[in-house]
Image (cartoon, rainbow, N blue to C red):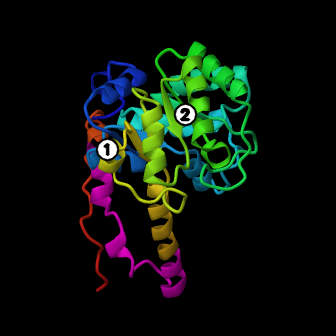
Amino acid sequence: MTYLVADDLPAAPAGERFRALLARPGIVQLPGAHNGQAGLQAKRAGFEGLYLSGAAMTASMGIPDLGMITVDEVCFFIRQIARATALPLLVDGDTGYGEALNVMHMVRSFEDAGAAAVHIEDQLLPKKCGHLNDKKLADPHDMAAKIAAARKARRHLYIIARTDAAASEGIDGTIARAKLFLDAGADAIFPEALNTAEMFKDVAARLPGVPLLANMTEFGRTPFFTASEFEAMGYKMVIWPVSSLRVANKAQEKLYAAIKRDGGTQGMVDFMQTRSELYATIGYHDYEALDATIVTTIIPQAMPQRS
């Protein structure tokens, strides 16, 4: 499959394909993919949907997740992941990049780039990762206006309202905000930074029939739960937002230390994706086959040895 051949592309809009995933029994598992290569690897592992995290995007750019990036920068990531994988992609929309008109522009831009779904949060700028302290919440009615604007702008995009109210307003505040956002047109609710199984269960019990998203990020406020455990607590979606980037960054750190220490990569080859594995993942020969003028590449299978 390549994105260049029309017959290889999905016929249904991305948002409709996301809804089809949610219509199936069981919880929808959405691992974070911080670029097209990560998305392809997740797809090869068997996942049918993906998540694009604002924290992963910004960290991969070498900057903090404080609401600094623009809609166009996010669309660059959306396009590469949607193009590479053709999987329904849920995108972190932060605070919507402004007020109502900005939110509508974001929705139109994300849809055009290939996104299937977006979540918008009720923080004020400068926003923070949901698992950090002292987040500043927007007025719930202002947030509801953003959701209504997003609903008006979307053709197929699935809209998830995230609320960070648990830390400062408790579960009662979380539920009150969630109901207001649902009335404004949200398709689902993302209660962020819950820290006990009882909190997750309480939210689900008080929002019966509402699709809920759980965030299983590492090094945050939420203890480890599995997808099946979240499903048993009443959740329909689960994301692992930054996991792929964390693992990749740790491996790169070891690589650069080894080069500095050893003067080369000879001690790291066993930890590398081979050229053959890389080309298989990106479908190198599928692209070559589309143009008979390209000579088929013969892939070296091992490191050459010094004589």
Q: Which residues are magenta?
A: 256-285
Among the two numbered marks 1 and 2 on one chain, the one whose residue lies closer to the N terminus? 2
* Residue 116 shows in the view: yes
- Mark 1–mark 2 Cα distance, whole angstroms, equals 23 Å
Q: How many marks?
A: 2
Is the magenta region chiefly helix, strand or loop?
helix
Mark whose residue sits in front, 1 or 2: 1
Residue 209 horizontal/vertical position (percent):
39, 26
Picture quadrant of residue 183: top right
Q: Name the kind of residue labelled 1 in the image.
A: Ala
* Dot 2 alpha-carbon crowd within 10 angstroms: few under 14, some 14 to 19, many 20 or more: many
SS at badge 1: helix
Name the amino acid type tagged 2: His
Read off the residue under disc 1.
232
Above or below residue 38? Residue 208 is: above
> Does 154 sit left or right of 284 as displayed?
right
- The image shows residue 210 at horizontal and vertical percentages of 43, 28
